[in-house]
Image: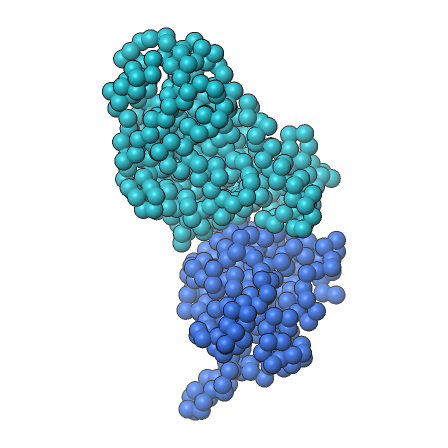
Amino acid sequence: MSRTEFMQGNAACAEGALAAGCRFFGGYPITPSTEIAETMARRLPKAGGVFISMEDEIASIAAVIGAAWTGARAMTATSGPGFSLMMENIGYAAMTETPCVIVNIQRGGPSTGQPTRAAQGDMLQCRFGSHGDYSTIAITPNSVQEMFDLTVKAFDLADRFRVPTFLMSDEIVGHMRERVTIPDAVDIQRPRPLAEGSLPFAAGEDKIPGFAPFGSGRAVHVTGLTHDERGYPDTTDPEAHDKLVRRLVAKVESARRDIADYEIVNPGAETVFVTYGPPSRTVEQVMRDHPDDSIGHLRLRIVWPFPEFALKEFPNAKVFLMPELNMGQVVREVQRHVDQPVVSIPKIGGELHTPAELVRVLEAHR
Amino acid sequence: MIAPDWFRGDRLPHIYCTGCGNGTIINCTLAAVEEMGWKRDETVFVSGIGCSSRAPGYILTDSLHTTHGRALAFATGVKMARPEFNVVVFTGDGDLAAIGGNHFIHACRRNVDMTVVCMNNHIYGMTGGQGSPTTPPGAISSTTPYGASEPAFDLAELAVAAGANYVARWTSYHVKELTKAITVGMQTPGLAFIEARTQCPTNYGRHNKLRTVPAMIEHLRSHAILVAKRDRLVAEGEPIPEGAFTVGELVRRNQPAMGVRR
């Protein structure tokens, strides 16, 4: 059974988190994400969970990581300035393989920028923002329904791969109101428990260690320092660092096909739009207005790890067109994987591309 | 050895310098844990970055060695999510009062039910002896080569003002008093802050005419005055001796606390 509601994207995100079993939210108010914190503040205590308003976003993500190590599903939500503050501890979560979910309702930047306007300007920051090498997962919903569904999915991926997982939404989808179907229950996938006799940071073929949250009686030492399979610091041995960091990257990158989530329309097309998040809605409008098999659409629901193989599903492609609400960020990733021309269609200022704007570019390249 | 079951034997030797006071503070804390009768798998040690913050890595429990200054925010997440855990934070003056200053006052304000032990050695020890927010005015460090020119924070008074339910200060000389204070802190619902002034012979003492460990410990002993004595001097209009700091229990109260075991 399920129920259908008319709901705001941010509220649907919070409902998705609750359905996924999230029982800890640490946050700090910031436009345009605040409704997520407000919904969690109202709903979590009644669901037996904990909502805490921390002193800043650094503390918010820190508390989330602490809660995650007790075995709770834990989440925070923010926007650009807060996301920047979280960067150091996001690296800590990657290094310590802490499953947690970070929602970024993107707004115009840099700096305080446009608090009430949409952007997709943090797409490279979520991939590379903390220092050092690591890989994480970034999910990009384009509807209120996906704010619910993909928040649930974010928790599963975070648990399964033991990585901080980003829901990279934006002011448009966060504040959009649409019909959403909320199931009575969702299937959830918790981390694989640490096997008896296994070391807490030793991984098998899938490169993901079993998880022994605090209180399991395993006396796990968790550190952001380079560590061995016991979790003990080993900060000067080049091989120890090489082995650990390569595994942290490979556990995500080698599972790209497994993690990938995208939609393909007209795979025989010659002119192919590549989108993620709300610019896909404009492309969908263009394709409704111009029914034409020569126009294709690849819509990414997960941008990182980047599914470069999805681009090969358009064997006749002569050109890729990529509208983004930034100066051209993920387009670089597309460019380095294909031989065809890739046209960036940047738009900043806070509004979606209009269908007419995309049609002009489309006509110029076919 | 105090509480031998609580040490990770396979982590030895430790990183602390000869004559460091941190081991004394760790011993006092574990003696208090033993006095409390806590179970290892219900106890979590949390720390930030610095010499003090390496302590959890030597203790055989679940432990979270986090980012610089943020230990209290991580610990807040642990304790609020699982109030049945006993949570102890090890921190230092740089970790707590400089980069972590905001988390410090807010953790005290929330009065989260945890025990915070600050090893205050008045210096950034791990990075080689730079001036910290508790470096006394005039003291020489690698970044205050002409003497520290900034006033120092009084960490214990800061914790009192910010709302912690229990605040005490002792030194690495006052082993029995310190152990007792940590125990009382652990028994008190809410945030217990125990400042333990300690010696860093490597990076503080040798630059400040305190060339031996006994000289440093004697300096701590001779400059510590009991809270009651300070109060008496104030009441009598007598001057507080120069460089003196209060030791003892600064506050014990029962304000509403968060994360208390249900």
Nearest the camera: B240 or A132? A132
Quarter location, residue B218? bottom right
- At x 41% / y 65%, what residue is drawn? B162
* Residue B141 horizontal/vertical position (percent): 54, 72
- At x 61% / y 40%, what residue is drawn? A245
* Residue B31 horizontal/vertical position (percent): 66, 65
What colour denotes chain B? blue
B229 lies above or below A319:
below
* Residue A273 horizontal/vertical position (percent): 38, 19
Instruction: Say left or right for B150 vs B216.
Output: left
A151 lies above or below B22:
above
What colour denotes chain A? cyan
- At x 33% / y 19%, what residue is drawn? A283
Nearest the camera: A119 or B142? B142
Instruction: Say left or right for B116 vs A211.
Output: left
A324 lies above or below A239:
above
- At x 46% / y 84%, what residue is drawn? B231
Looking at the image, can residue B178 be seen?
A: no
Looking at the image, can residue B130 be seen?
A: yes
